[in-house]
Image (cartoon, grey):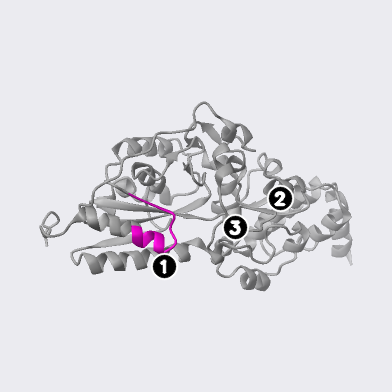
Amino acid sequence: MQQNEYPLSVDYAALAASIRAWALELGFQSVGISDTDLSSAERGLQEWLAQGMHGGMDYMASHGTKRSRPAELLPGTLRVISLRMDNLPPDARDSWQVLQDSSRAFISRYALGRDYHKVLRNRLAKLAEKIRAAAPEFEGRVFTDSAPVMEVELASKAGIGWRGKHTLLLTREQGSRFFLGEIYVNLPLPVDAPQAEHCGRCTRCMDICPTQAIVAPYKVDARRCISYLTIELKGSIPEELRPLIGNRIYGCDDCQLVCPWNRFAQVTLEPDFAVRHRLDDVSLVELFAWEEGMFKDRLAGSPIYRIGHEQWLRNIAVALGNAPKSEAIVAALRTRADHPSELVREHVAWALERQGARDMHLLCADRVSMK
């Protein structure tokens, strides 16, 4: 069947209504449908890439215009179905309390449970099956932050919410505490109207950012963003930014925590997004003691798993260096001072110096080498 040849008997408005109903049954909280015209967003993306603000995320540039032209990524695509699933875990310790206790580890609240990629992909696949059963001519593909897709821009066009100044999607109902997923389809479904923006003159997200990574409204310099530094960056964290990271060892929620719209956020009903292994409130020293086998065992099925044990230790070493001086912290850091990874050793040495223990550590190492 050619791209624009469809059975005249298909009621696409009725099909769109059915898609919304099926999505809610599958655990999504909101659904929107958009066309594929991202020309205005494409210009902004190209400027952002040209300025190098994607840092080491080479994949942001490697796909050319496929990210901003859905039909190039999946030929025949006419519409994009965007879906939202709430992710705020129930019973998690208050984020501000953890951030203020620098001996504890702060992990972005979306990552306290199971990997959202698997959860959303499974639900999206089930929705796609229902669409195919109702419209045999359907061809499409599901996405969950797993391909060059401008998900915030598409969800904004689909009327799910609007882009906030921190670049995340915002809604009146749930703030920004949710995941997004998409289905590219070859069906001429009716599209939804975008929402108006409701950020006004508020700049709380920009003002709170520990590293001032939100360099202008709607523009984030990833090279300064703590989420990038602790998750996407594979090498050494720039020394000038390490003190600003505080006790954040995986991601950063500050811009969401101060957003007035997140006062409406409701906890998720998805069991998979509930807190696992006390990750909402655990000491840095305890997590730093996890050997690689324990890391893999406890974080299997978690989004944190993908950064690996080496990067895990790097991040925690920085947080330990930022914690109040403590003999327990110095002792913990010394257990990794001779780690096989140069990356870990570098950040441990920095943390020991911050703890005022570098000279003592080097003296001890010299004495051992002389024996």
Name the residue carrying label 2: 318
Nearer mark to the viewer, of 3 and 1: 3
* Kind of element beneath mark 3: loop
| Mark 1 / mark 2, whichever is N-terminal | 1
Say what amino acid the circle numbered 3 marks.
Pro
Q: Earlier in the sequence, mark 2 or mark 3?
A: 3
What whole-number distance in Å separates the C-alpha atoms at marks 1 and 2?
Answer: 36 Å
The reply, left or right, for residue 282 in relation to residue 311 is right
Query: On the picture, is 255 further left or further right than 194?
Result: right
Q: Mark 1 = which residue?
A: 122
**324 falls in the magenta region:** no
From the image, which quarter does the C terminus lie in? bottom right
Mark 2, secondary structure of its residue: helix
x and y percentages locating residue 38 in the rendered image? 30, 41
The residue tagged with tag 1: helix, strand or loop?
Answer: helix
Question: Of callouts 3 and 1, which one flags the residue occurring earlier in the amino acid sequence?
Answer: 3
Nearer the observer, 89 or 80: 89
Dot 3 surroundings within 10 Å: few (below 14), some, or many (20 or more)?
many
- What is the magenta range? 21-32
163, 32: nearer the viewer: 32
User: Which residue appears farthest toward the top when viewing the image?
Assistant: 201
In the image, what residue occupies the spot 56% across and 62% down?
Answer: 273
Single out the mark in the foreground, 2 or 3: 3
CB atoms of marks 2 and 3 within 8 Å: no
Q: On screen, 209 above or below 274?
A: above
